[in-house]
Amino acid sequence: MRTERIIDADMMARVQAAMEADGGHNVPCVSHALIGSDWTLWGAFSVVYAPALFFWMDTRKGTGLAALRGLRLAQAELRKLGHKRILLPIQPSSPYYPWVRSIGFTLIGPCELFEFNPPEE
């Protein structure tokens, strides 16, 4: 098995189709494919900067309208950096969770975020 950087639309389509066929899995901002010696696609991963928007709005002060304005301002900053697709990790317990789909976000699947932060040697 080896890694192959995804550099064209055909390879991207092949990877996206394979993930969809395997239960609708998704790797946001996929950048590389895992390829077998016979060109079999084994998997894919992302090693690029993923434009994730980690957002907090004080629930005691914020309203839905204020949160929407804040999200739009944050999205504008990411667009200035050239990002079109933005990831928004949000907990289902958030009071804003029920309406994120109505403002254009699409649920790509539940997940928990893990951080690898090894101790300094």
Image (tube, rainbow, N blue to C red):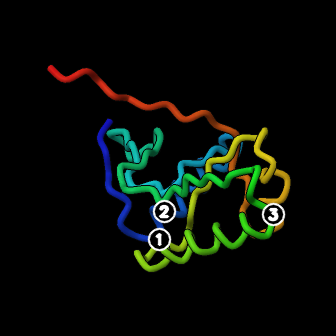
The quadrant where residue 57 appears: bottom right
Q: In this orientation, which residue lies closer to the viewer: 49 or 40?
A: 49
- Which quadrant is the N terminus positioned in? top left
Left or right: where 103 falls relative to 16: right
Left or right: where 2 falls relative to 61: left
Q: Position of residue 121 (x, y in %)?
A: 14, 19
Q: Looking at the image, tell me whether mark 3 or mark 2 is earlier in sequence order.
A: 2
Q: Looking at the image, tell me whether mark 1 or mark 3 is earlier in sequence order.
A: 1
Relative to 2, residue 65 above or below:
below
Q: In this orientation, which residue lies closer to the viewer: 62 or 52?
A: 62
Task: Please name the amino acid that badge 1 sits on.
Answer: Ala
Task: Tell me the SS state at disc 2.
Answer: helix
Task: Please name the amino acid that badge 3 sits on.
Answer: Gly
The residue that disc 1 covers is: 9
Badge 2: residue crowd in 10 Å (few <14, some 14–19, many ≥20): some
Q: In this orientation, which residue lies closer to the viewer: 86 or 6?
A: 86
Q: Which residue lies at the image location 40% right of the left edge and 70% below the top edge?
A: 8
